[in-house]
Amino acid sequence: MKQRAFGKTGFIISEISLGTWQLGSKWGDPFNEEIALETLQTSVDLGINSFDTADVYQGGLSEETIGLFNNKQDKKVFVITKIGRKLPKQDTSLYTKEALNQFIDESRERLQVDQLDMVLLHCPPTDLYQKNHVFDYMDGFKKEGKIKHYGVSIETIEEGLLALNHPGVEAIEVIFNMFRLRPAEELFDQAKQKGVGIIVRVPLASGLLTGKFTKDTTFGPHDHRTFNRHGEAFDKGETFSGVPYDVGLKAVEELKRVFPANELNLYALRWILMFDGVSTVIPGASKPEHIISNVKAASLPPLTQHQMDEVKRIYDDYIKAHVHHLW
């Protein structure tokens, strides 16, 4: 597993990390701690040295399981967690010092650590980025020793650029994939200049870029790919990267002409790693087999210029009109 500098944090992070939104369960299924622990162990065995989680994932079970696992490791895995989505609504006025302190303390307890490696504000409201006091709170938690590093998880490029105005921000987590090109055009270079690491989330566009879905594919009733296609529950960009499902399927068919159809997921991840502004990418895995597949992407040869150009052409032809102006 190759590694990259993680911005100005001083940490050297594996190119592929583990996203734990689905750790130990598929969408809507009961949490399985045994499978979750196997997935974490498999990740470490394959060279992954960072896990991405959040206090709301599996109602806190994701953090608890990572804490249980990490507590038994001689060499601790770097854990990125996120806070803020437990608030009753996304209102900047609710991001009080007391609320953030409580979330941090609860995550410290679940992860069984005195100091959190990294805390991200979990897709907060856009106007929060213009409120210096919230970032002052985070600086204070860092001085207290409760957190080592902090950053933000964002929905839009505009939020990312605003975040860069806050010198304490050390990482930005952003949706970036073959169906989301704007971050590479407008954010990565600016972040690199300021020593801010980039964590890439939703790298496979909620599974669209695996190439395994068809117009007849169905998802469970508790799966966001069923209930959030139009943003009914949260930002629609979180589901299929905001791309209409039928449009995404057409674009995927075009991508299969460029890359091996049965390995599209690997090439989609390798495409992300072609950008040196990326610190790490966090594909999810609900079981060990998924992470075994994902890490193969890191050993693929670099994509050719023709392949890179074709991804851009397909994006321009099919995707750009639906997403470029929104995120």
Image (cartoon, rainbow, N blue to C red):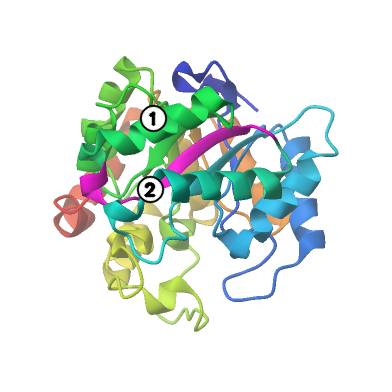
Secondary structure beneath dot 1 equals loop
Q: Amino acid at mark 1?
A: Thr
Q: Note whether residue 246 is visible.
A: yes
Q: Nearer the viewer, mark 1 or mark 2?
A: 2
Q: Position of residue 213 (x, y in %)?
A: 46, 69
Cα gap from disc 1 to disc 2, whole angstroms: 49 Å
Q: In the displayed structure, does residue 43 sit left or right of residue 119?
A: right
Q: Amino acid at mark 2?
A: Thr
Q: Which residues are magenta?
A: 114-128
Image: 270 above or below 94: above
Q: In the displayed structure, does residue 264 sit left or right of residue 62?
A: left
Please name the residue shown 48% across and 49% down the image. Answer: 83
The disc placed on residue 167 is none
Which quarter shows the N terminus?
A: top right
Residue hosting label 1: 304
Residue hosting label 2: 96
Q: Is residue 89 magenta?
A: no
